[in-house]
Image (cartoon, rainbow, N blue to C red):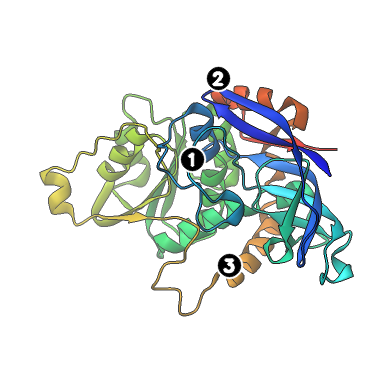
Amino acid sequence: MKTDALWFTRPGKVEIRPQELPALAAGEALVRASCSAISSGTEMLFYRGQFSSETTLDANIPTLSGNAVYPLRYGYCMVGQVIEVGPGVDARWLGQRVFCFQPHQQHFIAPVEMLFPIPTDISDEQAVFFPNLETAANLVMDGGPLLGERVVVFGQGVVGLLTCFLLSRFPLAKLVTLDCYPQRRAASLAAGAAVCLDPAQSDALAAIHTALSGEADLTFEVSGAPTALNQAISVTGFGGRVVIGSWYGKKPLQLNLGAEFHRSRIRLLASQVSTIDPSLSGRWDKERRYHIVWDLLRQIQPERWISHRFAFQEASQAYALLDERPGEAIQVIVLYA
C-alpha cells in the first residue's frame, strides 16, 4: 500500500513524499490518520536545523529511533483509526480510534502495544494533546509544588499552558507566568495564572518579584529560549527549585553560575517525560500516568488552544507560520481527511 509521509529535508524545508507500506506482520495494525499536532518546540529545532547530527531522535519511541540526519521524519502527536489488523490481533481493534507517538503521515503501521485506545468521550482534537499534557504532568510531578509556594513558569506555549493549568489547581500563594506573545499571555490568564508578564520588558525580573511579593520557591523553564534559564535562576530564592523542561538544541547557552548562584543552594532539575522521577517510581509507572492524562484531558479541554488547522498537503505552510510568525499561533494541527 502507498501512503504519503512528511520529511524534514533541510533547514526551513519539509516535503511530502510517497512511501510504500509493507504487509502487516503479526501483532501489527494499519492506522489511517485523522489529525496530528505540530510541536512548536522540538519539531521547530529540526525544521530550523538547530540540532546536532549526533542527536538521537528518541530512543524510547521505536518510530523515532536513529540519529537526527536529514532527510528525517519527526512528530509524536498522531491520532487515527485502525482500518486493518495483522495476524494474531484481536478483531476488536478494527475501527478503534487510537493515539500513537508517530511522525506525520496519512497511514502507518504499528504494533498494537504502541497504540493507545482513545476513550469514547474524548474527541480526536482533544486526544492530539495527549503527549504534551503527559509532559506537563511530568513537569509538575518533578517540581513537587507545595502548599503556599510562589511559582513561576517561563513560556506559555502549549506545554507551558498545560503546566499552568495543572499548577493553578494547587493551593499556591501565587502563580506567575511569562511569554513574549500577547495571544499566549491572554490564554495563560484564562488557564489560571494570576499574572502573565512579557519577559522581554526591561523590568521583567523586578515585575516578577513584585507580583510574587518575594522570590520564587519553584520555577519552570519551558520557553525553549536559552536566555530564560538565567532569568529563571535569578528569580528563584534560596533553596528553591528550577525545573528545566526545554530542549535548546544547538542554540547557544551561557549560564550565569557565579557566586550568587553558588551560595543559593538552588536545585536545577532536568525533566523529560520519557522517564519518571526515581523517587516516585516505586508507586508510579507510565501506565498510571497515562490514565491520569486521559482524565485531565476531559477537565482541561485543550482543543480551545488550537489556533490553526492545515490540510496535510499544506503542511509546509504550517511550519512556515510557526517559524516566521509564532506570535499568531498556539497549537497548529494537521488534518488528513
Q: Which residue lies furthest to the left in this view?
A: 259
Upstream in sequence: badge 1 or badge 3: 1
Q: Residue furthest top?
A: 324
Q: Which residue is drawn at 74% across and 25% down?
A: 314
Q: In this view, does 252 lie above or below 154?
A: above
Q: Which residue is drawn at 54% across and 46% down?
A: 159
Residue 324: numbered disc = 2
Q: Point out residue 252 in the picture as x, y percentages from the top left corner.
A: 31, 31
Dot 3 amino acid type = Arg
Q: Which of 252 and 186 is in front in this view?
A: 252
Q: Distance between the residues labelled 1 and 3?
A: 28 Å
Q: Nearer the viewer, residue 280 or 218?
A: 280
Q: Which residue is drawn at 76% across and 32% down?
A: 312
Upstream in sequence: badge 1 or badge 2: 1
Q: Point out residue 106 in the picture as x, y percentages from the top left corner.
A: 78, 41
Q: Point out residue 223 in the picture as x, y percentages from the top left corner.
A: 44, 38
Say what secondary structure mark 2 lies in: helix
Give the position of the C terminus as an image quadrant: top right
Q: Name the residue under label 1.
A: 68
Dot 1 amino acid type = Ala
Q: Point out residue 216 in the picture as x, y percentages from the top left corner.
A: 32, 50
Count of numbered badges drawn on the protein? 3
The image quadrant that residue 20 belongs to is: top right
Dot 2 amino acid type = Glu
Residue 289: numbered disc = 3
